[in-house]
Image (spheres, rainbow, N blue to C red):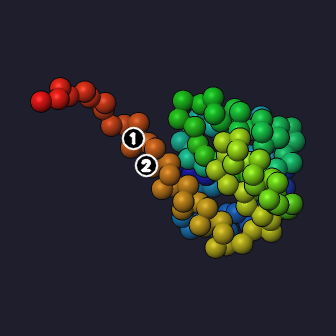
Amino acid sequence: MAILSISPFEEDHARLQAIIGRVSKLLIAPNLPAAKRLLESRNIFLVLCECDSNPGTWLDSLEYIQSLPNPPLLIVTSRLADERLWAEVLNLGAWDVLAKPFDDDEVLRAVQSTMVRYRSSAQLIAKPFSLTAAD
């Protein structure tokens, strides 16, 4: 399973690779159109999306991701990560917000919690549903 970073900023990709490269494969895309090709062809469990990515905002990315059969979770990244953005992100269905510049411990915490969530939701989907008669 891989993580996808959507950002027009090369320094975001380099910093995330330095942090995440120890625990997961990091794929990179400069924008949503490039990210769509990766999302359609790879097994990605997490998307880290720059708040102000262009073309395609984090909201566009979230909408596209939610249309996928097995959607990855989305974390929004921003230099202006405040309570308003955090509330909007969570209320609209994304997983979390990470402030930039990236803190190693925060990024790893977010990635690990996402891994746990993604694996548990995949296990729920994989379990067969059966009805049993009550005695």
Q: Where is the C terminus found, in terms of image quarters?
A: top left
Q: Position of residue 116 (x, y in %)?
A: 48, 56
* Amino acid type of the residue that numbered disc 1 sits on in the rendered structure: Leu
10 Å crowding of disc 2: few (<14), some (14-19), many (20+): few
Q: Which structural element holds mark 1?
A: helix
In this rendering, the answer to whether 73 lies above or below 13 is: above
Give yes or no for contact between labels 1 and 2 (Cβ–Cβ under 8 Å). Answer: yes
Q: In the visual, does 22 lie left or right of 135?
A: right
10 Å crowding of disc 1: few (<14), some (14-19), many (20+): few
Instruction: Look at 72% across and 57% down and name the residue there.
Output: 97
Q: Which residue is mark 2?
A: 120
Q: Which residue is mark 1?
A: 124
User: Marks 1 and 2, Cα distance to the nearest angstrom?
Assistant: 6 Å
Residue nearer the viewer, 84 or 28: 84
The residue most toward the front is 135
Instruction: Look at 46% across and 44% down and name the residue there.
Output: 121
Q: Position of residue 9 (x, y in %)?
A: 84, 56
Q: In the visual, does 73 lie left or right of 1?
A: right
Q: Position of residue 114 (x, y in %)?
A: 55, 55
Residue nearer the viewer, 68 or 28: 68
Residue nearer the viewer, 93 or 42: 93
Q: Which structural element holds mark 2?
A: helix
Instruction: Look at 71% across and 33% down and name the residue there.
Output: 63
Q: Quadrant of residue 19?
A: bottom right
